[in-house]
Amino acid sequence: MTPRAARRPAAKPAGRSAGAAEPKATRAAKPAAPAKPRAAKSAATPKPRATTSAARPKATTTARPKAAAPRPAAPETARKRQVAAGPEAALKRPRKPKIAPDRLEQLVAAARTSLEDDKAEDILVLDVTGRSDFTDRMIIATGQVERQLQAMAVHLEEALEKAGLRLRRNQIQASPDWVLIDAGDLVIHLFRPEARVTYALERMWGPESPSPEGAAGA
């Protein structure tokens, strides 16, 4: 063996290329950690935020009272105004020719019978001949409630029509406390108790009021 041959390195085994790197030992891959499920937004309950108003109660301020609306007139005042501008104003009409006395008495009797049938209270017939320039007879009666007053007025209209006197619509004026039927020489007032006291027509037109000599009270 020559010295040059002794220096030659031993031949590499076949099948492995000179430039190929030795494979590294493969490490076992770690299993991936399972993903945490995200809570659905719709199911999640939102945490209430602390408000400063809850932590620090606000001082309650007293609301200033608003300017009060003008109050309507008191019932008593309204009735007094109605006395001045209601029944009396409704009877400001030119006087028609008077009817015969027997005819007038027939109408008064028919009206009184109708009121008695409707259970009217304190029926009063006044002869105001000479004391009034718009009528000769005045009937005053009381009903307890508005419905009774309206029924009394309807039945009076029917009774007068049967007696031969047909009323026009403008001859009947009504309010919750008072009904006026203007039949010319016969005027009928239907009142609730409180309104009758307020109007006090008995004192204004009754037997105690000034009357001419020879005038007869009913």
Image: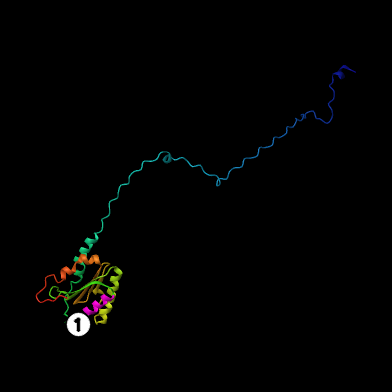
On-image quarter of the N terminus = top right
Question: 53 above or below 170?
Answer: above
Q: Position of residue 20 (x, y in %)?
A: 77, 30
Question: 100 above or below 59?
Answer: below
Q: Position of residue 183 (x, y in %)?
A: 21, 76
Would you say the magenta stretch is mainly helix, strand or loop?
Answer: helix
- Residue type indicated by callout 1: Arg
Residue 26 placement: quadrant: top right
On-image quarter of the C terminus = bottom left
Numbered circles on residues, count: 1
Question: What colour-coding does the image apply?
Answer: rainbow
The residue carrying pointer 1 sits among few (fewer than 14), some (14 to 19) or many (20 or more) residues within 10 Å by Cα, namely: few
Q: Position of residue 67 (x, y in %)?
A: 28, 51
Residue 209 placement: quadrant: bottom left
Q: Is residue 186 visible?
A: yes
Point out the stretch of residues depicted in magenta: 107-117
Left of 200 or right of it: where is 41? right
Q: Farthest residue toward the top?
A: 3
Q: Farthest residue toward the left?
A: 213
The answer to which of 136 and 14 lies nearer the viewer is 136
Q: Position of residue 199 (x, y in %)?
A: 20, 66
- 119 within the magenta span: no
* Residue occupying image coordinates x 26% and y 77%: 114
Residue 131 placement: quadrant: bottom left
The answer to which of 201 and 123 lies nearer the viewer is 123
- 114 within the magenta span: yes
Q: Secondary structure at mark 1?
A: helix
**Mark 1 = which residue?**
103
Q: Is residue 156 visible?
A: no
Question: 130 above or below 35?
Answer: below
* Residue occupying image coordinates x 87% and y 16%: 3
